[in-house]
Every structure is written in C-alpha cells, then in structure tokens.
Image (cartoon, rainbow, N blue to C red):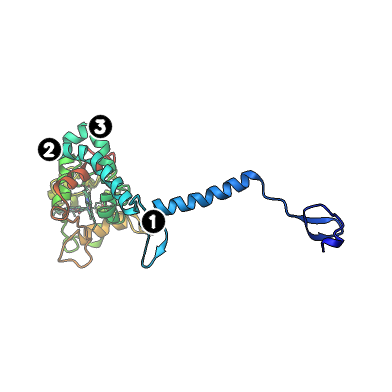
C-alpha cells in the first residue's frame, strides 16, 4: 500500500476515499491524553479508597471504610441532635406554652406534619380541609371547641357526638319544615325546634353546645356536607330523621373520631394539638 500512496511522507494510514480524503494517524491532543490517564488513575485510586470491585458476594470494602448506611446514620444523628434541643424543651411545656413561643411552635408544626399525614389526613385531609362525614379542622367552626386544650383532649379521648333519630316523633312534612328553617339559618323560627326537644342539645338559640359536640345550626356551615346531587335541605332532613351515631336507626349517620391516647405518646398528641390549632382556626 505504502508504495502507491498518493500522499507519500504523510502519516496517513493508507485509507483514502474520494481520491483525497485520508485517515491520519496523529496522536490525540495532549489535553485529551492527560484527561485519559488522569481518569484511569482516578479509577484505580477510587477503587482503593471506596467499595468497588465485586469479588465473591461482596465488593471490596475500600480503605476508608465508607458505606452508604454509615453516611445515612451520621446524617440522621445530626438531625436527632438538632431536634433533641427542641424536644427536651417541649417535654415540660404545655401546648399553650408552645404556642406562645414562635420558634418552638414553628418547630412543632414542621416536625409533626408527617404524623398528621399518617394518622389524621386519611379522614380530615392533608390540610385539615375535611371530607364527607369528616369535619373541617382548618376553620374556626368547632363542634367540640377550638382551644388547644380541647383539641388535645379530642385527640387523646376521641369523640362521638350523639344525636337521636327523630323519624318516630316527626312526620316527613314536619322534618322538611324544620330542615327548611335550618337551611335558612333560623331553626328557632319553627315551633317544633322547641317542642320536639332539639333545644335540649342544640340550645335555645340553636347555636349548639360544645360540651355535646352538637353543631351550630344557625351559621350555614354544615358538618355533614350534602352528598352529590343533594340539597342542603335534603341532607339536613336526613340528619333529623335518622340522627347521628344512633344505634337504633340503621340509616343513622356515623361520626366517630377515634381516640389516640393509647396509640400516640403524650408529646405527639400535644404537638398534633398545636398543629391543628395552627391551621388557623384555633381559639
Ligand atoms: C377514622 C377517621 C378519623 C381519623 C383517623 C381522625 N379523625 Fe378526627 N374526627 C373524625 C370525626 C368523624 C370527627 C367528628 C366526630 C363527631 O362528629 O362526633 C372528628 C373530630 C375531630 C376533631 C374535633 C373537631 C371539632 O370541630 O371540634 C378534631 C380536633 C380532630 N378530629 C382531630 C384529629 C386529629 C389530630 C387526628 C389524627 C391524630 C384525627 N382527628 C384523626 C374522624 C377522624
Ligand atoms: C341528644 C342530643 C341532640 C338532639 C335531641 C338533637 N340533636 Fe341535632 N345534633 C346533635 C349532635 C351531637 C350533632 C353533631 C353530631 C356530630 O357531628 O357528631 C347534631 C347535628 C345536627 C345536625 C347536623 C348539622 C351539620 O352541621 O351538619 C342537624 C341538622 C341537627 N343536628 C338538627 C337537629 C334537629 C332539628 C333536632 C330536633 C328535631 C336535633 N338536631 C336534635 C345532638 C342532638
């Protein structure tokens, strides 16, 4: 080949296309060679320092003794150390004291978010926005009360408001009229509100009693949101006729807030109370 190379003296490989396009045998640029050898040196050095070559079941361990688990553990220890400072202070404080200390309150909210997500969000929604049958925690309309102490008690003991079914003492027509009065925000305008004993639990003014968890019937806020396609009046009528948690009525509404006193620690519940309070509706 070299003999009939039309470009003699040039360091081409003898591969020539289209008469004059040649493949040359120049060495790669210097910077490229440096990077090439450096990367090989890096590879060998890395293999000595860190876990690398798969030999048998396990890779070689490397002289630094580094593992991902160790690095994770160190990171975790760091977080625990930062938290410990706050956690130690929280231990001896009431939920109210925590609220009075903005730094600690912020810490509490940040640290208990996941606990709320795991234990409460399935029913009350991630932001306390409630859901069908589950009350909103983010507004200032409370069944049982919105002081931080009451919230703490609700979480510890659970709640189960009981309203008897009134289907036996009210005709369908009477129930509709009562429902209309409530939907209009004026339950006391219907004489049956007094005569059929609603006042015993909802109060003379229909504004509810937090001790019983009986809803305020004058504020237009419904703890039982009407189902799709149903009007407020239908939904209120259903509550009146079948009650809430009344075991004698198969169509009764179910509303049970489970107790967490045995599932979560006192400190966790205290923090959750602060968290719920801080949704903005705490009183
Ligand atoms: C299984 C569903 C469920 C879970 C889980 C649940 N709740 Fe409830 N919660 C309810 C129901 C239902 C009520 C209303 C009870 C009633 O009407 O008698 C309620 C009521 C409440 C109230 C009272 C609201 C008011 O207006 O007075 C608070 C506060 C509350 N829950 C906080 C929490 C927190 C915090 C958690 C998590 C630790 C939690 N709940 C977990 C169903 C649940
Ligand atoms: C034994 C006590 C009691 C009596 C009597 C009673 N209620 Fe109730 N009522 C409650 C409680 C407690 C709740 C809240 C239940 C819950 O959320 O767990 C409630 C809830 C309601 C609701 C639902 C409100 C909402 O926000 O969705 C309506 C409507 C209602 N009652 C109307 C009446 C009317 C009308 C009467 C009379 C015919 C009456 N109640 C009699 C205890 C009672």
Instruction: Please report the residue visible at 24 percent of the width from the left and 36 percent of the height from the top.
Output: 105
Nearer to the camera, 213 or 187: 213
N-term-proximal mark, 2 vs 3: 2
Residue 110 seen? yes
Would you name the residue on which mark 1 appears? 51
Is 131 on the left-hand or right-hand side of 145? right
Q: Quadrant of the C terminus?
A: top left
Label 2 Cα neighbours within 10 Å, binned few <14 / some 14-19 / many ≥20? few
Give the distance between the C-alpha atoms of the residues marked 1 and 2, in whole angstroms.
46 Å
Q: Could you tell me residue 211's position as x and y percent? A: 13, 46
Q: Quadrant of the N terminus?
A: bottom right
Would you name the residue on which mark 2 appears? 92
Would you name the residue on which mark 3 appears? 102
Residue 188: quadrant of the picture = top left
Label 1 Cα neighbours within 10 Å, binned few <14 / some 14-19 / many ≥20? some
Give the distance between the C-alpha atoms of the residues marked 3 and 1, in whole angstroms.
46 Å
Marks 2, 3: nearer the viewer: 2
N-term-proximal mark, 1 vs 2: 1
Residue 273: quadrant of the picture = top left
Q: Helix or strand or loop: what does disc 1 sit on?
A: loop
Give the distance between the C-alpha atoms of the residues marked 2 and 3, in whole angstroms.
16 Å
Nearer to the camera, 182 or 64: 64
Depicted 67 relative to depicted 282: above or below: below
Residue 222 seen? no
Nearer to the camera, 203 or 24: 24
Instruction: Please report the residue visible at 87 percent of the width from the left and 57 percent of the height from the top.
Output: 6
């Amino acid at each position: 080949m070299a003999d009939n190379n039309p470009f003699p003296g040039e360091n081409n490989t003898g591969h020539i296309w289209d008469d004059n396009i040649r493949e040359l045998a120049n060495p790669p640029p210097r910077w490229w060679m440096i990077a090439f050898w450096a990367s090989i040196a890096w590879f060998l050095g890395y293999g000595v320092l860190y876990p690398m070559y798969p030999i048998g079941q396990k890779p070689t361990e490397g002289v630094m003794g580094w593992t991902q688990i160790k690095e994770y553990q160190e990171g975790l220890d760091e977080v625990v150390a930062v938290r410990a400072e706050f956690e130690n202070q929280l231990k001896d404080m009431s939920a109210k004291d925590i609220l009075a200390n903005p730094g600690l309150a912020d810490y509490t909210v940040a640290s208990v978010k996941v606990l709320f997500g795991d234990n409460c969000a399935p029913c009350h929604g991630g932001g306390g926005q409630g859901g069908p049958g589950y009350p909103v925690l983010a507004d200032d309309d409370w069944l049982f009360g919105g002081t931080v102490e009451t919230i703490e008690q609700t979480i510890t003991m659970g709640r189960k408001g009981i309203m008897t079914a009134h289907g036996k003492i009210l005709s369908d027509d009477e129930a509709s009229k009562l429902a209309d009065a409530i939907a209009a925000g004026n339950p006391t305008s219907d004489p049956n509100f007094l005569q059929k004993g609603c006042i015993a639990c909802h109060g003379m003014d229909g504004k509810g009693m937090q001790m019983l968890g009986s809803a305020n019937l004058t504020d237009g806020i419904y703890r039982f949101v009407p189902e799709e396609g149903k009007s407020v009046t239908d939904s209120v009528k259903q509550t009146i006729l079948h009650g809430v948690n009344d075991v004698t009525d198969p169509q009764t509404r179910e509303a049970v807030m489970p107790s967490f006193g045995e599932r979560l620690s006192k400190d966790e519940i205290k923090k959750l109370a602060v968290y719920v309070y801080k949704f903005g509706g705490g009183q």
